[in-house]
Amino acid sequence: MTRDEPEHEGRGTAKQAAAEAAAALIGEGMVVGLGTGSTATLFLEALASRVASGLKITGVATSRRTQELASRLAIPVSSLESEPRLDLDIDGADEIDPQLNALKGGGGALLHEKIVALASSELVIIADESKLVSQLCTTLPVPVEVIAFGWPSTVRRIEATGATVTVRGGQVSPYITDGGNMILDVQVSRGSDLFECVEQLKSLTGVVDHGIFRQVAAQALIGHADGSVTRLSRRAGGADTDHVL
């Protein structure tokens, strides 16, 4: 799920192009992970059009919001309990680096998104070109999902690592995830190795998971304001690029 942000015409066109390119990847009989967020919503709408034309697929939603939208769009939805292995997962991202590592969870669905992604044979990230960055989290914090019970103690443990913590939604009315957990927005220490930091955070009691998806995405479909789409495929040392539309 991606952070809510003001939309403008060029970005809207770019997201739409990426979403439609992703919908074209879905084949007959596939079990598909359905992401959460603004670009994922456009993907669901494009997929619904194909389903209405006769495509038979099964979706597995990453959030209650997505499940409700898929049901309204007449996209068949199942669960990971019934469909433990998915053919493809389509989801958005807040940031994507040159190795296709992604920052996700700006909307709070990171845990379910990661579980669905890891249950899939392939994760395809869809985004507009503004989400491409040279390095993750130089400006955005890392969303960290934590158990609500005893959360102030968890905050202190995280802060002891040198990180700065903000409670998503505020301490009085914190944001609660579909799993009943809280989200902390964590700014890791400047100059630290991001991947080492988030693994350290994950080892702390009370922390469930974080929004860094390292070497999870197989490819990304990046939409541009002119309606074209670029496909990036992960490989050692970087990503291969080819033009799609």
Image (spheres, helix red, strand yellow):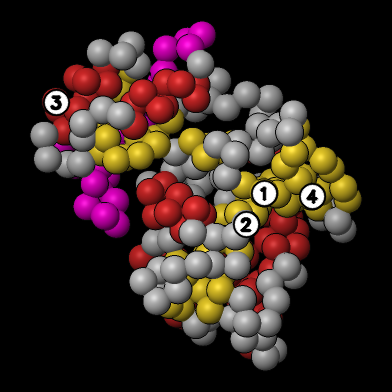
Mark 2 crowd level (few <14, some 14–19, many ≥20, 10 Å Cα): some
Instruction: State the quadrant of the C terminus.
Output: bottom right
Contact (Cβ within 8 Å) of mark 1 with mark 2: yes
Amino acid identity at mark 1: Ala
Mark 4 vs mark 1, CA separation in Å: 11 Å
Mark 3 vs mark 1, CA separation in Å: 37 Å
Mark 1 vs mark 2, CA separation in Å: 6 Å
Amino acid identity at mark 3: Ser
Amino acid identity at mark 4: Arg
| Residue 159 locus on image (x, y percent) | 27, 16
Mark 4 crowd level (few <14, some 14–19, many ≥20, 10 Å Cα): many
Does the magenta run of residues contain 245?
no
Left or right: residue 102 versus residue 105 is right
Q: Mark 4 vs mark 1: which is more N-terminal?
A: 1
Dot 3: element: helix
In front: label 4 or label 1: 1
Residue at mark 2: 122
Contact (Cβ within 8 Å) of mark 3 with mark 1: no
Q: Is residue 27 above or below residue 170?
A: below
**Mark sitting on residue 153:** 3
Examine the image and state in which quarter residue 165 appears: top left
Q: Which residues are magenta?
A: 172-192
Residue at mark 1: 218
**Mark sitting on residue 231:** 4
Dot 1: element: strand
Dot 4: element: strand
Q: Would residue 11 be visible to someone looking at this image? A: no
Q: Mark 3 vs mark 1: which is more N-terminal?
A: 3
Examine the image and state in which quarter residue 232 appears: top right
Most frequent secondary structure within the magenta stretch: loop
Q: Mark 1 vs mark 2: which is more N-terminal?
A: 2
In front: label 3 or label 2: 2
